[in-house]
């Protein structure tokens, strides 16, 4: 049980976005990568000892696959809303259980119940997540579906956008995107170790695309989301390879390998 004094020592706040390529097997529908989730949870537990955490999940072979199915079958809005929301709820509950087994108590916040996206801005209500954070619970949210005015009647809000907006609303100093690559790569495959915020627009023209099904636009959408949702509280955004042990803690400590983006 956490004591009041220990809770007060958690002054730093970090948002960790776990990409779908990390927590699921993106080439196998509705298949979690249990060994990786367990390893990452242990790494996050070490961070949680001294800091406050918020976690965002990518869709992977759950949300992205379910959304692709609904588009392929031209499903009604009602059926699509159910199918994608149910898939992401299943993934979130699974990750929450593994986090709990590693000593991290989380509370799930479904975006379809609290967000009204406008472009790349999720426009969510984060007050309850902040209350949970102040009680040492870990807010857990995810890329999700929501009703909208499109022709199909539904749209997707990306975890990439959610991570930045949540970071700003809860006062996070770092947002860490955990992917299956070492960071932002040039078209020739070389790692870009550092970028300034003003350089992101140029970087999107050279970023590689995703080889997996990804309904939110891959790395370009990620960089656009970072640029659009940046705020003064955020000092650094990292993109690191979650398939390699220790990379998340490395980003927390400010060392690579990875790509760091600064104002």
Image (cartoon, rainbow, N blue to C red):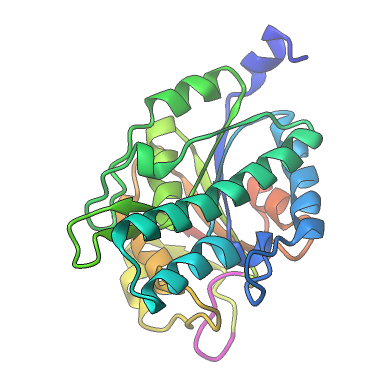
Q: Position of residue 226 (x, y in %)?
A: 39, 57
Residue 151 is drawn in which quadrant? bottom left
Stretch of the chain drawn in magenta: 183-189
Q: Residue at x 66, y 63 (%)?
A: 24
Position of 135 compared to 102: left or right?
left
Q: Residue at x 51, y 80 (%)?
A: 210
Residue 98 is drawn in which quadrant? top right
The quadrant of the picture occupied by the N terminus is top right
Q: Which residue occupies the extreme top position in the image?
A: 4
Q: Position of residue 176 (x, y in %)?
A: 56, 52
Viewer can see residue 157: no
Viewer-closest of 11 and 66: 66
Q: Position of residue 228 (x, y in %)?
A: 29, 56
Q: Which residue occupies the extreme bottom position in the image?
A: 188
Q: Residue at x 71, y 15 (%)?
A: 6
Q: Position of residue 82 (x, y in %)?
A: 42, 52
């Amino acid at each position: 049980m956490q004591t009041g004094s220990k809770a007060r020592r958690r002054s730093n706040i970090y948002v960790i976005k776990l990409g779908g390529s990390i927590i699921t097997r993106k080439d196998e529908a509705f298949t979690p990568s249990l060994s990786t989730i367990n390893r990452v949870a242990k790494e996050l537990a070490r961070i949680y000892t001294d800091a406050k955490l918020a976690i965002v999940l990518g869709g992977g072979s759950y949300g992205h696959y379910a959304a692709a199915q609904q588009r392929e079958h031209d499903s009604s809005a009602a059926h699509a809303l159910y199918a994608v929301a149910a898939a992401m709820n299943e993934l979130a509950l699974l990750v929450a259980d593994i986090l709990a087994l590693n000593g991290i108590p989380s509370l799930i916040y479904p975006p379809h119940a609290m967000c009204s996206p406008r472009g790349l801005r999720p426009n969510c209500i984060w007050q309850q997540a902040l209350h949970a954070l102040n009680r040492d619970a870990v807010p857990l949210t995810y890329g999700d579906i929501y009703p909208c005015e499109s022709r199909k009647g539904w749209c997707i809000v990306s975890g990439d956008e959610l991570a930045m907006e949540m970071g700003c609303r809860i006062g996070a100093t770092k947002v860490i995107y955990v992917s299956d690559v070492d960071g932002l790569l040039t078209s020739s495959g070389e790692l870009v170790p550092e970028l300034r915020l003003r350089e992101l627009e140029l970087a999107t023209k050279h970023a590689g695309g995703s080889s997996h099904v990804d309904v939110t636009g891959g790395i370009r959408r990620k960089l656009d989301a970072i640029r659009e949702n940046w705020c003064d509280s955020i000092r650094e955004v990292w993109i690191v390879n979650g398939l390699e042990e220790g990379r998340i803690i490395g980003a927390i400590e400010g060392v690579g390998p990875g790509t760091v983006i600064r104002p």
